[in-house]
Amino acid sequence: DSFPFRMSDTVSDFIVLSGADKQQDVFYAAVDRAVVDAYRNAMQQAGIEPIFFDSETVALARALVPSATDKPTLIVDIGDTTTLIVIYDRGAVRLATNTPIAGAAFSSALATKLNISLAQAEALKRKVGFDPNADEGRPFLVLQSVMKDIVSEIREITEFYAGKTGRKIADIILAGGS
């Protein structure tokens, strides 16, 4: 019961990453069949016949991590509503999770703490970001308070991975549009 939907309602696949006999590392991906069907239908209506679908985590790792690397790499993709945290190691995604702390939380915190509209907060976030010198450092302090929650998630995940594998993160890639 690790998935939020019935397995009969999913499309899934797996690959064996390493190991043999009694112990193997396996990458398993499952997605709600309705999501796959919606993408397939949209593509077919546009005259495109999809050959396969890939998970966001695998596609992100393939696009951002040099293929020759043998170092554990952390990818943090901060989107609008979720932050995707991925550990890529030894040629594959080894761990992936997401947290609901993301760009919208940054904007919301700025709007609340600085008593400005959400549109103004979004513009301020994009203009000054984490610049500690902008606007007397007020936006920086607000954004930093939200970022601490993301950093806490990252720390927990990387410590778990290091404890299970003995391998510590060597590189970090920050991605996303928030």
Image (spheres, grey):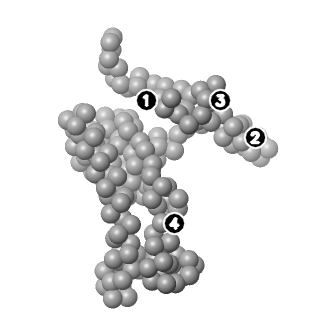
Which of the two marks, 4 or 1, is nearer to us in this view? 4
Q: Gap between marks 4 and 2, in whole Å?
A: 30 Å
Q: Quick one: label 3, few (<14), some, or many (20+) residues within 10 Å?
A: few
In front: label 1 or label 3: 3
Q: Which numbered marker is on residue 139?
A: none
Q: What residue is shown with label 1? A: 27
Residue at the image position 40 percent from the left and 49 percent from the top: 85
Residue 146 in sight in this render: yes
The residue tagged 3 is: 9
For label 1, count other residues whose C-alpha is less than 10 Å away and answer few (under 14), some (14-19) or many (20+).
some
Residue 119's image quarter?
Answer: bottom right
* Rendered location of residue 159, percent (x, y): 25, 44
Quick one: which residue is furthest to the top in this view?
21
Q: Is residue 126 visible?
A: no
Tell me what residue is drawn at x 37 percent, y 88 percent: 135
Q: Amino acid at mark 3?
A: Asp
Q: As shown in the figure, which amino acid type bears the numbered disc 4?
A: Ala
User: Label 3 near label 2: C-beta < 8 Å?
Assistant: no
- The amino acid pointed to by label 2 is Asn
Quick one: which residue is furthest to the left in this view? 166
Q: Which residue is mark 2?
A: 41
Mark 1 or mark 3, earlier in chain: 3
Identify the residue position indicated by label 4 in the image. 104
Badge 4 or badge 1: first in the primary sequence:
1
Q: Earlier in the sequence, mark 4 or mark 2?
A: 2
**Structural distance between the alpha carbons of marks 4 and 3:** 30 Å
Q: Nearer the viewer, mark 4 or mark 2?
A: 4
